[in-house]
Image: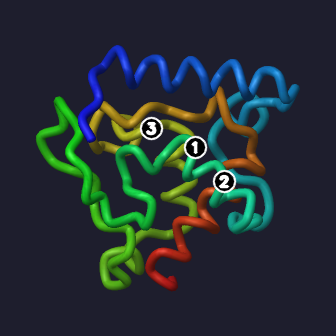
Amino acid sequence: MTRSRWQAGAVVTAALMSWTASGGESALKAVNCTPQGEVRGDVGRGAALHLQHCAACHGVDGKAEVIVMHMDVPPKDQSDPAYMKTLPDAYLYLAICRGGEGVGRNFLMPAWGDLFSDQDIKDLVAQIRTFSGT
């Protein structure tokens, strides 16, 4: 699946509108991208968020077997246990909150900290961990 920057922007805009309607406080504003308490949340909620907001680039199963226009290097395979064991949960949280550029990765991954609550990001971390069993 290819996605233009305009389409990616539309996805982020839709996510913002959806999130704003839910009335949650963003993780960036609430905790400045620093998780509070346990970093892993609810896998079921994380699965729904991942499917809606992340799967287009990272793949439904975290394998990133998708083609994304303007992306020189595809996202890493999140189903690879050896790779995922090198990433602490706090790093995953930070990458979601601040985006790819915020952790020295691809600038195309948006910063979700203004859109997702602290709990949303924790739920995503839990879901991402299911791909590799880590």
Of the two numbered discs 2 and 3 in the rendering, the one whose residue sits closer to the viewer: 2
- The residue sitting at 26% across, 51% down in the picture is 66
Q: Position of residue 70 (x, y in %)?
A: 17, 30
Hey, what amino acid is under mark 1? Gln
Disc ID at residue 62? none
Hey, what amino acid is under mark 3? Gly
Query: Pointer 1: what residue?
Result: 52
Query: Pointer 3: what residue?
Result: 99
Of the two numbered discs 1 and 3 in the rendering, the one whose residue sits closer to the viewer: 1
- In the image shown, does 80 or 91 lie closer to the viewer? 80
Cα distance in 3D space between marks 1 and 3: 17 Å
Cα distance in 3D space between marks 2 and 1: 6 Å
Quadrant in the picture for residue 6: top left
Classify mark 3: residues with Cα within 10 Å, few (<14), some (14-19) or many (20+): many
Classify mark 1: residues with Cα within 10 Å, few (<14), some (14-19) or many (20+): few
Q: Would you place residue 21 above or below residue 100 in this image? A: above
- The residue sitting at 60% across, 21% down in the picture is 14
User: Badges 2 and 1: C-beta atoms under 8 Å apart?
Assistant: yes
Q: Would you place residue 49 above or below residue 76 in this image? A: above
User: Badges 1 and 3: C-beta atoms under 8 Å apart?
Assistant: no
Quadrant in the picture for residue 13: top right
User: Badges 2 and 3: C-beta atoms under 8 Å apart?
Assistant: no
- The residue sitting at 20% across, 45% down in the picture is 67
Residue 59 appears left or right of 77? right
Q: Would you place residue 8 above or below residue 50 in this image? A: above
Look at the image and tell me in which quarter the N terminus lies.
top left
Q: Position of residue 36 (x, y in %)?
A: 77, 54
Query: Pointer 2: what residue?
Result: 48
Which residue sits furthest right? 23
Q: Secondary structure at mark 2?
A: helix
Q: How is the image coloured?
A: rainbow
